[in-house]
Image: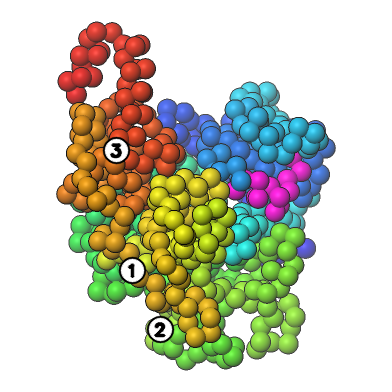
Amino acid sequence: MKSAFQPLLHEILHEAAEKHANHIAIEWRDHQISYAQLEAAANHVANRLRGAEIAKGTIVAVMMDDPIGLVTGLIGILKAGCAFAVLDPNYPEKRLQLMIEEAPPGCFLLEEQFAAKLRGMVGPNDERPFLLTDTDPGSTNLPEPSVSLEPDDLCYIYFTSGSTGKPKAIAGRLGGLSHFIAWERSTFQVNATYRISQLIPPSFDPFLRDVFVPLCSGATLCIPDSRETILDPHQLMRWLEDRRISLMHTVPTIFRALVNAQPDPAYFTSLKYMLIAGEPLFGADVKKWMDIYGERVQLANLYGPTETTLAKFCYLIQPSDRSRQLMPVGKPIEGASALVLDDEQKECPAGVAGEIYIQTPHRTLGYYNRPELTSAVFIQNPFSNDPADILYKTGDVGRVLEDGNFEVLGRKDHQVKIRGVRIELGEIEKVLRDHPLIKDAVVKDWDKADGEKFLCAYFVSETPVANAELSVFLSGALPPAMIPTFFLRLDKLPLNPNGKIDRKALPRPEESTMLRDEHFVAPQTPIEERLATIWSEVLGLQQVSATENFFALGGQSLLAVQVILRVQERFQVKLSLNSIFETPTIQTLSAQIEHLLVAKIETMSDEEVQRLLAS
């Protein structure tokens, strides 16, 4: 039986496509696709799935680079009554294999370039269908397949870090996703005139609000040219302005990068709303923004775990909030409520910290095929006799302020968020302990002066292990956001009287404790000199030895992207993110750049070579 917030998402998408058939649905680079074209392409995917006898409720793993094809595929999967699970082709194969094992797909929808990679992971004798994307949907009048869908149907799988070393698969409920999209469209008056940015990586569930809020509203979804555009604040500002974005979702790290990049007061003329979520939002950053733009752009702070379906709290930031140290997350949205309880599950008075519990019928279905994990965090409301009255135990510490707004203060466990990505420190520790030279390891999060978090790994080994070696080792199993910034070798890990690791006694990593080279090695070639300048600019150091490790100096994935962008600008060659993990010193990276330059020069005319040398 459908609830009051229906119609469901696939029905709203179909209605928007019919009403706005000729309007531009998606823009990416110089590509545009209308709502009629999007509908036809999505119906084509849905009919291919039904034709391949993929049953309702089947998980379809999706691996694509083309963002328009990805969005089309996800809508087609929904129309077929299946559930999508996005696999990031940039993830290490070990990580992808764990994801496939945790929530086994019944079918794979992918670009041909990834077929061999996935076939190698599942094995040559695996009989599950591999459906390759095609560019021609055939008829523009393909009908939707006839599939009856209900609010409690599984519609997506998203993975979050797990303390056991395996990612956990969260099963999305169609009704829960439909409810949130309807709430945001209504709250921020989204209509066909809006142009909404898509900045969140597809492998994280906030991507869903990037995509479905505009496409359910007849608005235009605008996708940046590349991931590098998103991570470079100057490029991002220009792109947001050029594309006339009216609503954007982002994380506090990207917001902080924008305000610290001294944005032009004339920018963001079309921007109405900036919705921020995923990490604590600090008053200092809000003040910097408001000092430039005042009340012209409405900032909103959202909060909600993946388990309760995207966000379940919202706070509209006011000019008076610029003096706050930490922004509240607001009050529960319509269709949700929350409590702050102490360790005995008694309600905390206003101002007293406790654990946040969320009540909503629009939560997810829990952890896929993990009833024991689901029942541990989805518990019966202790103040109700109704077994259907369920609270989600967030693990977040917070309090209710005197005005009724909620404030999130941190975590009870060893889970953290780095640049909006939820991370179980135990998962990193498990991989570190798999290194043959490491006897024991622990990972701790720290705050920089600006409030941004970073990770430090502490390890015990009989012989020294190079930071570069540990970075490369971890990058073979974990995504970039989970690679620590610092690695510190200790004689032993500190223990408390109970024999447990005393995290409070771990030394804070400072520049003075970085594993710097004892002897400074000056850059020897023009390429090394330019690269040393780039590293100094990005890392904020006066000088860098040609043999020092980028990650030992405080580098991390976001800073690595900045290096890649500056290398591309100054040398006119393109490096992959893995290049810095594989060649993390100026000497080794410059050798790779030199190799690329030689290959490029061989294809250039004499005039082009002279221009390159003069640049």
Q: Residue at x 25, y 36 (%)?
A: 531
Q: Residue at x 63, y 57 (%)?
A: 166
Residue range of the region highlighted in magenta in the rendering:
95-107
Q: Amino acid at mark 2?
A: Leu
- Let me know if residue 97 is in the magenta part: yes
- Let me know if residue 393 is in the magenta part: no
From this viewpoint, is residue 238 visible? no
Is the residue marked by circle 2 packed among few (<14), some (14-19), or many (20+) residues within 10 Å?
some
Q: Amino acid at mark 1?
A: Arg
Q: Which residue is mark 3?
A: 586
Q: Which residue is mark 1?
A: 508
The quadrant of the picture occupied by the N terminus is: bottom right
Q: Which residue is mark 2?
A: 401
Q: In x, y percent, where is residue 435?
A: 54, 53
* Residue 137, picture quadrant: top right
Q: Residue at x 51, y 67 (%)?
A: 415
Left or right, 238 with respect to 192, comes to left
User: In this rendering, is residue 363 above or below 214?
Assistant: below
User: In this rendering, is residue 9 above or below 444?
Assistant: above
Residue at disc 2, secondary structure:
loop
Q: In x, y percent, where is residue 501?
A: 49, 75
